[in-house]
Amino acid sequence: MRVGVLSLQGAFREHLAVLDSLGVATRKVTRPEHLENIDSIILPGGESSAMVRIAATTELFPVLGEKISAGLPVFGTCAGLILLADRLTDASLDGFDRLGGLDVTVARNAYGRQRESFCAPVQVTGLDGAFDATFIRAPQILDLGTGVEVLSKYAAVPVLVRQGNIWGGSFHPELGSDMRIHEEFLHSLGATV
Ligand code: GLN
């Protein structure tokens, strides 16, 4: 199995490091041709408005969006969740290609500004013991389509969701040394990590 990591901007190195530690082959994805022969892709946190601007210089997002709708498994974290959301509450990214595919409405920056970043223990379906989730200018998931399963909540609000092979989370699972959420995603794809 080879996992791509969208590497335009943001916390892609941290995701690559987690995947390396788990012994999974990776590829940095910055251009459409990097999507060949990957089995899934992770979209990191960072700044979605920067990612859509950088991505607009190639056909990367239209091609990736088609692959996701054709079944390529994907995990979007934080800014990556914003790229995957079918609906955003504000118009700040209007006019730019995103990806879509995840039947949720997302509010950008709804957990506050950079200085309001926080870490909180959350329970995650399938994991024994809490996961320390880091929220950085995090997007909030406001509503869910019927096909979307909630894997974790913080303060009664969904923060990790799954719609088949499309996973999205408000927080940064790649920060810290706990790799269990990456393992869960990879296990769901049949990987033995
Ligand atoms: N607020 C950022 C955005 O809107 C996301 C923050 C993050 O990825 N940590 O893109």
Image: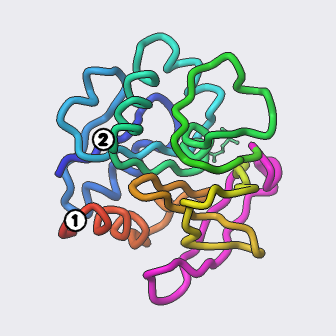
- Circle 1 sits in a helix, a strand or a loop, which is it? loop
Magenta includes 132? yes
Q: Amino acid at mark 1?
A: Gly
Callout 1–callout 2 Cβ contact below 8 Å: no
Query: Height in image: 109 above or below 147?
Result: above
Q: Amino acid at mark 2?
A: Gly
Q: Which stretch did the figure color magenta?
A: 108-136
Secondary structure, mark 2, is strand
Q: Disc 1 or 2, which lies upstream in sequence?
A: 2
Q: Nearer the viewer, residue 175 or 59?
A: 59
Read off the residue under disc 2: 4
- Going 41% across and 15% down the picture, which residue do you hit? 59
Which residue does the image show at 31% across and 35% down from the upper left? 28
**Residue 48, quarter of the rendered image:** top right
Residue 98 x/y as whole percent? 56, 28
Query: Is 71 a magenta residue?
Result: no
From the viewer's side, name the closer residue of 107 and 9: 107
Quadrant for residue 191, please give it.
Answer: bottom left
